[in-house]
Amino acid sequence: MMMMMRWRWRVAGNAAKLYRRTTRRALCVSSFAMKEIRAFAQKPQTDVTLRAMFDIGRGVPSSSAMLVQSAAFLYEELPIRLAKRAVELTNLPYGLSNTPSVKKVQALYVDSFIKITSSPKPTNTNSEHAFMKIIQGMLQRHRDVVQLMAVGIKELKATLGNNNDQFIDECPYLQDFLDRFYFSRIGIRVLIAHHLSLHESRTGWVGIIQEQCSPAEVLDDAATNATETCERNYGTAPQVIVKGATDLRIPHIPDHIHYILYELLKNSMRAVVERYTDLGKRDDLPPIEVIISDGDDDIVMKVADCGGGIPRKDMQKVWTYAYSTAPTPQSVEDPAPQASIGPLLAAPMAGFGYGLPISRLHARAFKGDLILIPMHGYGLDAYLYLCKLATSDASAVPT
């Protein structure tokens, strides 16, 4: 009996020692990783233009040498971009860094940093293929980052109390941080998605850039997705009418145009259905009109609806990351219905309040813009400016 007791004590003692050693080792690894991450965060990022991505990819076939060269660049560049965001995520004010959801985001960035830096630099076809698997997994793992950050702010509000909601929503520092964070996220995902797409042989494409991208065709796809989402939520949807330069084609990234147009059409459809339901005219919904214009430097797409517009006093709130007139999803596990819009990003129907601010970032990411002009009591006109890639040497991938 005594021997059995001693054995149990010995096992328990060894388990405790092992736990302490494992914990210390984990802390050392974490400390070492953060030290390395902070060192990488001090390094300068490399500017990459869409024009360069397009010209290089078009001029050289997707050969093994070109893919290895592209992978080697990402091997050096991605850790720097990930490190800058990982460090910033540890220094957010008001305790935002300590919320469960933001900690998950930081863990994703640290994990991706470690996975890349602990792998060998791509020097041949085999190592490039292994690296491709790493960044492919990263693209998928980071898919819910936007929603996680939104839930993190919601968790912060719950901790601070409802009296601080407006202060958090309108805090300039948080707005600036989220702009930088999401802007950088767009750039990281563009670089990864472009490299992965170079593995595919698609006529008329250079990576994720379509040589003869038709804004009208992208609009048609976005309208179909928005209509399906609206009908799923409300049982009906207004028609979308397209006018103007519908035959126009330019080199561009269709996924980005789709993301913005889907968001604009989704908002317009919801506003029209809700307004005309309140007016008792649910069966007589006015159409949403889209006009495409071919300018010298930009393609301009105007989305006009009769959804009642937005009060002038609320216009600044539209661009904050917490403003929404729709119910907020409870969590990332219980989001609003999602639209499939390609490998770069997915967006819920409504509720987080992130759609318009991130849509504007997508437009500005490539030297375009998104401007809203409301007529409260009638409707809203949204103007999307798309910089012509072929005429712009300044269309840098977001950093």
Image (cartoon, rainbow, N blue to C red):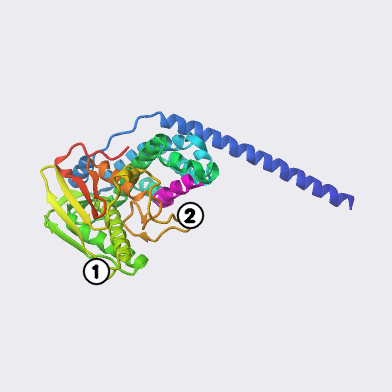
In the image: residue 147, left or right of residue 203:
right
Q: Which stretch did the figure color magenta?
A: 138-155
In depth, the one of 135 and 366 nearer the eye is 366
Residue 331 disc label? 2
Question: Magenta includes 150?
Answer: yes
Residue 208 disc label? none
- Residue at image coords 48%, 32%: 36
Residue 25, quarter of picture: top right
- Residue at image coords 32%, 50%: 196
Q: Main secondary structure of the magenta part?
A: helix
- Rendered location of residue 52, percent (x, y): 21, 40
In depth, the one of 336 and 381 nearer the eye is 381
Estimate how packed mark 1 is, as few (under 14), some (14 to 19) or many (20 or more) residues with alpha carbons within 10 Å.
few
Q: Which residue is mark 1?
A: 284
- Rendered location of residue 94, percent (x, y): 50, 36
- Rendered location of residue 389, percent (x, y): 18, 44
